[in-house]
Image (cartoon, grey):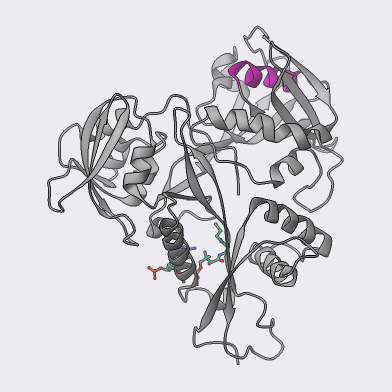
C-alpha cells in the first residue's frame, strides 16, 4: 500500500556533481523537482549539468521520503514525494548595504501526497534552522500568490513584461557616453558575474545570482539543458573603457511577427549603460520589436523616449517575496534616509520574531530594542507586511489602507514610508 499514514522522513543533503558520493540521491531528487514543475523527463546530461551548477551554489537539497512500504508498481521509496532547496546569497537592502539571505526554491509536493502538511513541515523546519544559524531574511519567488503569506512572506518587489516598438517611432533622447559592441557570447562566462556584481552593489532588491545565470547569458546552458546557439551578446563599455553592462538576446525567427528580439538577460551598472543598451537593441536591423520579461516597473526607459507609448507593458506582477526571520537584525541592517522613532507590534505565524520592537533612527543608523509586550505600538502588523515594506517598494500607507497594517498613531504609516524609502527603484534581476 502507499503511505496513507502520512509518515515521512525529511532528509537534507548537499548538492553534488557526478562522480561524488551522494550523486544518485541528488539525481533522483532533481528528477522529482522536474516532475513537480510538469517538465518532461530530464535527460541524464541535463540533470548532470544542473547539479554541477547547484554544487557551485552550495545548495542544500531537502526531500520528504515515504517510510512505509510504497504501493506496488508506484515510484520507489528513494524518490522523494516532496522537494525543497536552499542556498545563501546577499540581498541589497538599500544604500549599498547587504544582508545574508536564505533563498528558497524547488518547492514541490507530489500530487498524491499534497495537503498533508509536507510544505508546512519543510518550510517551518528550514526557516527555524536558518534563523538559528543567524540568517535574518528568507526569499523566494512564488508560482501562486496564495501559498506563502501564511508562512510570513510578503511581496517586496515587482517586474513586468514589455514589448517595445523599435521601428522609426523609437526615439531615445540620450547622448551616448560610452559605446556598445557585439561579442562572442562565451565572454559572458567570465564577464557576466563581474558586471552583475556592480549592478548588485547599486540596486536595492538585488539578490546574488546562482551559477546558472552566466551559463544562460552566454548560451552555454539553456532552459532545456542544451547549448543555445541562438544567443547573441552585446557589451557596453563605459567612458573609461571598462565593461559596465551587457545584453544577451535572441531573434525569435521569421515566423514571429512583428520580427522580434527577445532579451534573455539585460544587466547595466550605470544609467548610461542601460539607455545605451536599449539604443543598441532598437537599432538592430530587420527587427521591429524587442521584448523583455524582467523589466522594472519604475523604468527610466519610458521617460527617456520621446514617445513613451512605444512600450507596451502587458503584465505587471510580484517578483520577490521576502520573509524576515529576525526583526531586530533585519531592521538594524538597513540605512534609513529619514530619522525618527517607530514602535512596531509584530505578529509572526511561525513565532520566529514576534514581539514589540522600537526602531529608533538617528543619522540614518538604527537602534532596535524590544519593548514590553502591551506597550502601545505606532503600527501593528504581521511579519509579512514588514517584509513587504522593508525594501521600500511597497508603501506602508497602502498596506494600512488594505488593512494589513494597523495605524495606532496618526501619520505613522507615512513616517514608515519615508523611513523605509530607498535611494533608487527596487528591482530584482535574479530568478531562482
Ligand atoms: C504548493 C505545494 C508545494 C503545497 O504543498 P502541500 O504539502 O500540499 O502544502 P501543505 O499541506 O503543507 O499546506 C500548508 C497550508 O498551505 C495551504 N496551501 C498549500 N498550497 C496552497 C495553494 N496552492 N493555494 C492555497 N493554499 C495552499 C494548505 O491548504 C495548508 O493550509 P493550512 O495550514 O491552513 O491548513 C504543492 O501543492 C505543489 O507542489 N504545487 C505545485 C508546484 C508549486 O507550485 N510549487 C511552488 C513553487 S513556488
Reply yes or no: does residue 17 show up in magenta: no
- Exactly how many numbered labels are in the figure? 0
Q: Residue at x 57, y 19 (%)?
A: 308
Q: Relative to 252, does residue 135 appear above or below in the rendering?
A: below
**Measured from the top left, where is residue 41 in percent x and y?**
77, 66
| Res. 89 image quadrant | top right
Does the stretch in magenta take in 280? yes
Judging depth in this view, the residue of 364 and 70 nearest the camera is 364
Q: Is residue 114 left or right of residue 48?
A: left
**Horizontal and vertical percent position of residue 296:** 55, 31
* Residue shown at 69% from the left, 83% from the top: 76
Question: In the rendered image, which quarter is residue 309 located in?
Answer: top right
Q: Residue at x 27, y 48 (%)?
A: 381
Residue 49 percent coordinates (x, y) = 78, 55
Instruction: Left or right? Give the position of 378 relative to 241.
Output: left
**In the current view of this chain or complex, which residue is farthest to the top?**
175
Taking depth in this image into account, of 143 and 183 the one nearest to the observer is 183
Residue 261 appears in view: no
Which residues are the magenta region?
270-283
129 or 222, which is in the foreground?
Answer: 129
Left or right for 248, reference 109? right
Amino acid at each position: 500500500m502507499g503511505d496513507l499514514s502520512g509518515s515521512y522522513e525529511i532528509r537534507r543533503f548537499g548538492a553534488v556533481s557526478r562522480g561524488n558520493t551522494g550523486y544518485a540521491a541528488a539525481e533522483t531528487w532533481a528528477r522529482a523537482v522536474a516532475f513537480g514543475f510538469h517538465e518532461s523527463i530530464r535527460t541524464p546530461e541535463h540533470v548532470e549539468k544542473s547539479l554541477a551548477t547547484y554544487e557551485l551554489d552550495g545548495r542544500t537539497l531537502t526531500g520528504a521520503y515515504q517510510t512505509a512500504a510504497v504501493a506496488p508498481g508506484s515510484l520507489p521509496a528513494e524518490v522523494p514525494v516532496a522537494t525543497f532547496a536552499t542556498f545563501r546569497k546577499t540581498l541589497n537592502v538599500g544604500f549599498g548595504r547587504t544582508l545574508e539571505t536564505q533563498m528558497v526554491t524547488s518547492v514541490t509536493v507530489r500530487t498524491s501526497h499534497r495537503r498533508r502538511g509536507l510544505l508546512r513541515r519543510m518550510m517551518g523546519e528550514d526557516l527555524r534552522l536558518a534563523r538559528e544559524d543567524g540568517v535574518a531574511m528568507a526569499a523566494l519567488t512564488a508560482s501562486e500568490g496564495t501559498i506563502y503569506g501564511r508562512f510570513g512572506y510578503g511581496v517586496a518587489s515587482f517586474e513586468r513584461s514589455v514589448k517595445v516598438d523599435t521601428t522609426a517611432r523609437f526615439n531615445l533622447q540620450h547622448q551616448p557616453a560610452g559605446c556598445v559592441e557585439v561579442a562572442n557570447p562565451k565572454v559572458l562566462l567570465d564577464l557576466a558575474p563581474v558586471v552583475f556584481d556592480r549592478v548588485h552593489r547599486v540596486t536595492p532588491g538585488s539578490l546574488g545570482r546562482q551559477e546558472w545565470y552566466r551559463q544562460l547569458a552566454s548560451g552555454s546552458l539553456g532552459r532545456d539543458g542544451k547549448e543555445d546557439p541562438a544567443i547573441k551578446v552585446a557589451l557596453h563599455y563605459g567612458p573609461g573603457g571598462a565593461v559596465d553592462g551587457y545584453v544577451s538576446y535572441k531573434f525569435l525567427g521569421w515566423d514571429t511577427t512583428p520580427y522580434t528580439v527577445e532579451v534573455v538577460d539585460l544587466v547595466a551598472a550605470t544609467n548610461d549603460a542601460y539607455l545605451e543598451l536599449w539604443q543598441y537593441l532598437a537599432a538592430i536591423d530587420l527587427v521591429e520589436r524587442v521584448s523583455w520579461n524582467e523589466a522594472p516597473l519604475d523604468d527610466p526607459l519610458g521617460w527617456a523616449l520621446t514617445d513613451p507609448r512605444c512600450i507596451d507593458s502587458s503584465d505587471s506582477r510580484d517578483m520577490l517575496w521576502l520573509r524576515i526571520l529576525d526583526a531586530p537584525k533585519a531592521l538594524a541592517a538597513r540605512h534609513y534616509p529619514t530619522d525618527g522613532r517607530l514602535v512596531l507590534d509584530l505578529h509572526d505565524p511561525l513565532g520566529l520574531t514576534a514581539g514589540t520592537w522600537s526602531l529608533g533612527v538617528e543619522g540614518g543608523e538604527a537602534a532596535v530594542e524590544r519593548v514590553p509586550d502591551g506597550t502601545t505600538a505606532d503600527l501593528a502588523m504581521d511579519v509579512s507586511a514588514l517584509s513587504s515594506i522593508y525594501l521600500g517598494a511597497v508603501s506602508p500607507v497602502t498596506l494600512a489602507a488594505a488593512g494589513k497594517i494597523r495605524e495606532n498613531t496618526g501619520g505613522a504609516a507615512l513616517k514608515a514610508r519615508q523611513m523605509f524609502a530607498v535611494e533608487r527603484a527596487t528591482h530584482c534581476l535574479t530568478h531562482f
